[in-house]
């Protein structure tokens, strides 16, 4: 990489009508993160001096999404083509002297490495006027074509609508992504006209304008999957499927076992340790870390959770945001955790809800136990000490503390703190009435016969 500063212009002004959504197209999630933020994350790896997002329809949604990452926003009031859209960034980049990457918010999977390759090619010894990212799709369809010589120098670029049959036969297509020097970009854009089939200002025309000035451009290639665009929900699903397939392969290459890889769904930030085992039909939402040696059993759903070393989760468990499982702890069938810490070696094996809770090391939570953390207005915390034993079908009404080593008898509704090593029994004494059941059955049978 040369030492020139970098700017990125990201086009996100389109209406996205084919999505049929009130949410802007580039904000639809891919692996749990808006498409546009995937792209901005890759751009950030280049440490750009400036990042400009061109917005149009539903601009307020995009502006709110990019504000936390510090991107500048410019408005394209009329949708007059890609060249017109890029031109809207001229004022925002006034005084900037460096290299400019032109990217698309609905092409979210372009990697930082590919962007670097584009910039490196821009500063190769033959000094192309600009660099175009091309690809060879299985079905070239209506993509614009790139006609290049054997050295990758561009002879012609043409939109599909304006291409001849011979040009349409070429399978090297234009992704729309470019790298160009700031000194060249806006001067060339000012010369672009709209005398074409669509009546739009095409960005690729700057390549031919530079060629007319005696400055050829170059094309480099990448795979079709990396430049897949999203214009419909069906295309979004296809990109998601491709992303998930790559992430599963990476997980296994990094030392995790996926029993049925095609059934596991990762988020963009899922972090797995070594020797993690993931059984079928597991879903990871954003914000999950799983440490070495843990097992995630089938049909579990995790989001915003931390799973410690050698833990066991599920099957059919749900870990919600703020769930923390320390080393060797266990949650089993139909257990839900939310904003709760399960201490080292502690276990909740069946049918339990732990919300706003701290569970000490080695504690045992019996089946059917719930922490009653909400009174309809506020949330309260339950603390369960190390080594405590909570009997089945217990309700711990927060705020409440169960001391270390204490035992809560089955069926208890605990509303006051329990001392360490104490036994808490909160239920009526068992009473037995001899012969009552037989007399009851005899009476009810007679009544049923009379009713006939």
Image (cartoon, helix red, strand yellow):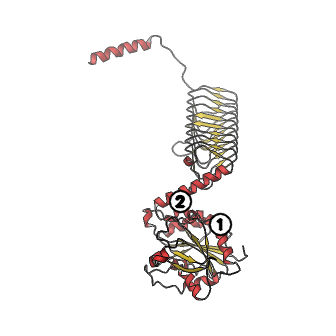
Assign the C terminus to one quadrant of the image. Answer: top left
Q: Which residue is mark 2?
A: 239
Observer-nearest residue: 99 or 364?
Answer: 99
Name which of mark 1 and mark 2 comes first in the sequence: 1
Considering the numbered disc 2 on the image, is that residue within a helix, a strand or a loop?
helix
Q: Residues within 10 Å of mark 1 (few under 14, many from 20)?
A: some
Q: Residue at x 61, y 88 (%)?
A: 214
Label count reads: 2
Observer-nearest residue: 152 or 398?
Answer: 152
Residue 337 occupies quadrant:
top right
Residue at far left of view: 452
Q: At which x and y percent is residue 410?
A: 58, 26
Vertical placement of residue 382 versus 444, above or below: below
Q: Which residue is mark 1?
A: 112
Whole-Å distance between the Cαs marked 1 and 2? 18 Å
User: Can residue 321 be seen at all in this image of the molecule?
Assistant: yes
Vertical placement of residue 434 versus 130, above or below: above
Assign the N terminus to one quadrant of the image. Answer: bottom right
Vertical placement of residue 309 versus 441, above or below: below
Vertical placement of residue 92 versus 400, above or below: below
Considering the numbered disc 1 on the image, is that residue within a helix, a strand or a loop?
helix
Classify residue 430 as left or right of residue 419. Answer: left
Residue 407 occupies quadrant:
top right
Q: At which x and y percent is residue 212?
A: 57, 88
Residue 46 occupies quadrant:
bottom right
């Amino acid at each position: 990489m040369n030492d020139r500063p970098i700017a990125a212009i990201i086009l996100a002004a389109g209406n996205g009508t084919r999505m049929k959504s009130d949410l802007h197209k580039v904000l639809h999630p891919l692996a749990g993160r808006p498409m546009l933020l995937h792209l901005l994350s890759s751009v950030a790896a280049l440490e750009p001096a400036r990042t400009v997002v061109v917005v149009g329809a539903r601009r307020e949604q995009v502006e709110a999404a990019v504000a936390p990452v510090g991107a500048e926003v410019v408005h394209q009031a009329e949708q007059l083509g890609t060249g017109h859209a890029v031109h809207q960034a001229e004022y925002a980049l006034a005084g900037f002297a460096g290299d400019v990457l032109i990217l698309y918010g609905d092409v979210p999977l372009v990697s930082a490495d590919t962007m670097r390759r584009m910039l490196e090619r821009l500063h190769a010894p033959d000094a192309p006027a600009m660099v175009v990212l091309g690809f060879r799709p299985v079905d070239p369809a209506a993509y614009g074509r790139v006609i290049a010589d054997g050295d990758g120098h561009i002879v012609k670029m043409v939109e599909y609508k304006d291409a001849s049959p011979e040009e349409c036969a070429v399978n090297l297509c234009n992704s729309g992504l470019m790298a160009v020097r700031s000194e060249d970009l806006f001067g060339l854009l000012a010369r672009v006209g709209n005398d074409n089939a669509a009546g739009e200002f095409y960005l690729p025309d700057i390549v031919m304008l530079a060629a007319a000035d005696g400055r050829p451009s170059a094309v480099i290639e990448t795979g079709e999957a990396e430049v897949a665009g999203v214009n419909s929900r069906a295309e979004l699903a296809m990109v998601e499927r491709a992303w998930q397939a790559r992430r599963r392969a990476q997980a296994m290459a990094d030392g995790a076992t996926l029993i049925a890889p095609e059934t596991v769904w990762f988020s963009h930030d899922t972090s797995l340790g070594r020797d993690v085992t993931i059984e079928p039909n597991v879903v990871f939402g954003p914000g999950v870390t799983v440490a070495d040696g843990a097992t995630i059993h089938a049909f579990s759903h995790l989001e915003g959770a931390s799973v410690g070393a050698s833990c066991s989760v599920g099957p059919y468990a749900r870990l919600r945001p703020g769930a923390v499982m320390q080393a060797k702890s266990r949650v089993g069938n139909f257990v839900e955790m939310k904003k709760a810490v399960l201490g080292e070696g502690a276990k909740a094996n069946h049918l339990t809800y732990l919300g706003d809770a701290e569970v000490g090391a080695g504690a045992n939570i019996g089946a059917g136990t719930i922490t009653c953390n909400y009174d309809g207005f506020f949330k309260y915390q339950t603390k369960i000490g190390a080594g405590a034993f909570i009997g089945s079908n217990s309700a711990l009404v927060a705020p409440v503390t169960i001391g270390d080593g204490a035992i809560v008898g089955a069926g208890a509704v605990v509303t006051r703190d329990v001392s360490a090593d104490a036994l808490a029994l909160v239920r009526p004494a068992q009473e037995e009435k001899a012969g009552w059941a037989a007399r009851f059955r005899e009476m009810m049978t007679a009544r049923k016969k009379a009713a006939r």
